[in-house]
Image: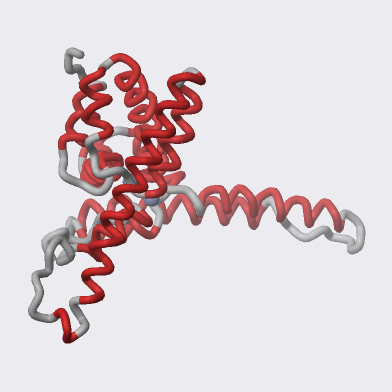
Amino acid sequence: MKENIYTIPINDAFSLDTECPICEFVKKEETDRIEYALGASMMEPDARIISNEKGYCQRHTSMMYSQGNRLSHALVLETRLKYLSDVISKLKSQTKPPKRIPLGKDKFKDNIKKNGEELLSSVHTCAVCERLEYVLDGFMDNLFHIYKKDAEFRNKFFLSKGFCIRHFELLLRYSIKHLSNEELYSFVGKLCDLEQSNLDRVTEDVEWFTKKFDYRYKDDDWKNSKDAVPRGCMKISGFIDAQYDE
Ligand SMILES: [Zn+2]
Ligand SMILES: [Zn+2]
């Protein structure tokens, strides 16, 4: 199948030696998005509106902070903080207590509830997380598009080292959406074999890692277990921040 803008990131991710190619794709997108949030997005009014209204979760705030670009980060914070202050002003002005109690008591409660919900909808959102969800959805749709058309990619897929458990579950969900009953039957069987054999491989590495702390094995070779902990973390949670060569 000829490479194009949709197939390149998928083939790139599946060409890496990794415990989860989908995590690798998300990681790259995430890094690009953090750079964008502190760079090009400053010049785009639409992106500023999204940044102000959605804000950033703790993980992505921390990643932005780690970039060390304090001026850009301050500009992002300044408008988000102002936006939050405006929401609170609105909450306060629209929930003035009724002049005569108990008259209007229920309406007063309803107003606080409604405006509080509006505030809540802004504190539990993240401009980067939402973007990642959107691009991951496109990635998964395209993955199954290629999977159905390209035998070479199907080989590559099943030669991978499997996936983190979250992306394994995501593959199941998207396979139901994209594959016929017959295709699905074969896909799910092979996917489970792939995942299980790779979970077993990582389990063996983790087991050997723990044995190396026993004096009886201290002079034995580490085999493939030196980086078993970060790889195990990745399999169970998609945790990818740890260096593999620790
Ligand atoms: Zn993953
Ligand atoms: Zn986030």
Q: Is 163 situated above or below 74?
A: above
Q: Is residue 180 left or right of residue 164?
A: right
Q: How is the image coloured?
A: secondary structure
- Residue at (16, 40) in percent of width and height: 16
- Residue at (25, 58) in percent of width and height: 231
- For the view shown, which residue lies furthest in the right direction? 103
Q: Answer yes or no: is residue 188 visible.
A: yes
- Residue at (30, 43) in percent of width and height: 162
Name the image quarter holding residue 188: top left
Residue 186 in percent (x, y) is at 42, 26
Circle count: 0
Quarter of the image with the C terminus in it: bottom left
Residue 136 in percent (x, y) is at 36, 35
Residue 189 in percent (x, y) is at 42, 34
In the image, 229 versus 202, the foreground residue is 202
Q: Is residue 25 left or right of residue 221?
A: right
Q: Is residue 138 left or right of residue 160?
A: right
- Residue at (26, 21) in percent of width and height: 6
Residue 33 in percent (x, y) is at 27, 42
Name the image quarter holding residue 139: top left
Q: Is 132 situated above or below 81?
A: above
Q: Answer yes or no: is residue 60 visible.
A: no
Quarter of the image with the N terminus in it: top left
In the image, 9 versus 61, the foreground residue is 9
